[in-house]
Amino acid sequence: MDVAFWNREIETMDRRRLTELQVTRLRDTLDQALHTPFYRRRLEKAQIQSGQDLRGLEDLRTLPFTTKDDLRQSFPFGLLAVDFSEVVRLHSSSGTTGVPTVIYLTQDDLDRWTDLLARSIVATGCTSKDVFQNMMTYGLFTGGLGLHYGGERVGMTVIPIGGGNTQRQIRVMKDFKTTVVHITPSYLLHIHSRLAEFDTRPEDLSLRRAFLGAEPHSENTRRKLEDLYGIDAYNSYGLSEMNGPGVAFECVYKQDMHIWEDAYVVEIIDPATGEVLDDGQKGELVLTILTRRAMPLLRYRTRDLAFLHAEPCPCGRTHRRLSRILGRTDDMLIINGVNVFPSQIEEVVMAVPEVGTNYQIQVDKVGALDRLTVKVEIYPKMFTGEAALLDRLKARIAEKLRASITINPRVELHEPGVLPAFEGKAKRVVDNRQEM
């Protein structure tokens, strides 16, 4: 199998030299982190007054974890390690409260991230001859712009179409002979279900590869997509706190994702004890970013469950491989690639005066797409027989939810006592989705 490299020296560096590079970059990262009040307090408690106090990667284990709550409590500038005038871009994502998490990048940070994405794209066999249709959302979400810049750096023809509007997506794929797409697996399945409506067959397309991201999917889903379209589909991993996509990516062998260890120190921990686990053991993924000056993050708890492969990959890359994401340690839902916390929904519905004390969140699979339904009990006085009054209330709740979670849910109104009641811990979420 043909194997191409974007930066062969880094990608095939022997483990000893790679560890030495990590230590050098980690020392620089610690020096940068000391510019923030948040990390200065934490590092001084750990008796780290300079990056040179770090003797090796093992010392990283003596430092406390960073969490999403830390990012929210430091909003907006508490973790910014450079003067704001050096920031060329920021990205933001919603959290469990009204306070978002925000990430800052200098021009150098952006260049380094783009380089990782170019490396990831080339690892799948893509070249400058490819036409790349990016169907991920643009804006404050990192998924769209990240792969966009990476594709341009490789020299691909990039079509920044964004998400949605299936008819237009298909037309553009046909008109410009798209060879590569970046897309959620559920939306790629949905597009296939609509092809016949637009007198199109998979063989009418020029598609050869798909980068799948933003939502977990099974190996069966990947194989189904490959069979339906006659393509190669590649799994990828990223999160906004670590810049976004490009943290880990599959190569042409598709035997799980190379995590780029020159840019990230990766640990797998027992989520209950914080103990670092050996390669091959399932636990929570913890990441330290080594190539971002504007906003260094140390030992960030991702809440994603996975394990690491230590054995070599046939492609020759020496960076360890990350398994598929096997679950979460928190209650976050992923709805068509969008992160949604039940507490966000509760915050909205419980602030509506007409809503009673009970609600339920239901997630279903409709065709290839997820459907979110929010069921709420409302006070009896609302059932006056005026359908228009109830329709306006449903629309108002739906709009408030959309503003908070960025997706459009279905809203159902119920009389008191209809939804299940719980004496102990309430089961607010009913997830009816099944792996395909």
Image (cartoon, rainbow, N blue to C red):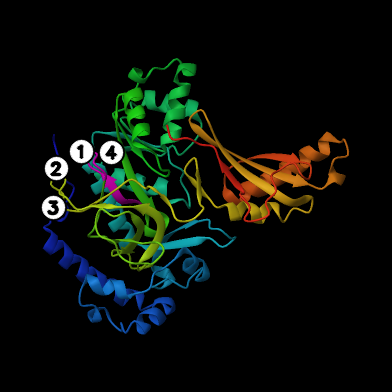
Q: Which residues are magenta?
A: 245-256
- Left or right: residue 350 compared with residue 198: right
Q: In 3D space, how far apart are the residues under numbered discs 3 and 2 (Cα atoms)? A: 12 Å
Q: Which residue is mark 2?
A: 314
* Foreground disc of the pair 3, 2: 2
Q: Nearer the viewer, residue 28 or 172?
A: 28
Q: Where is 151 relative to 110, above or below?
A: above
Horizontal and vertical percent position of residue 290: 28, 65
Q: Where is 162 relative to 269, above or below?
A: above
* Residue extending furthest toward the front: 423
Horizontal and vertical percent position of residue 213: 38, 42
Q: Which mark is residue 12?
A: 3
Q: Which residue is mark 1?
A: 253
**Label 1: few (<14), some or many (≥20) within 10 Å?**
some
Task: Provide the secondary structure element on which disc 3 rests.
Answer: loop
User: Which quadrant holds the C terminus?
Assistant: top left
Which three-letter amino acid code belongs to the residue tagged 4?
Answer: Met
Horizontal and vertical percent position of residue 326: 38, 47
Which three-letter amino acid code belongs to the residue tagged 3?
Answer: Thr
Q: In 3D space, how far apart are the residues under numbered discs 3 and 4 (Cα atoms)? A: 24 Å
Task: Indicate the quadrant where residue 363 lies.
Answer: top right
Q: Which residue is mark 4?
A: 156
Q: Earlier in the sequence, mark 4 or mark 1?
A: 4
Q: In 3D space, how far apart are the residues under numbered discs 4 and 2 (Cα atoms)? A: 26 Å
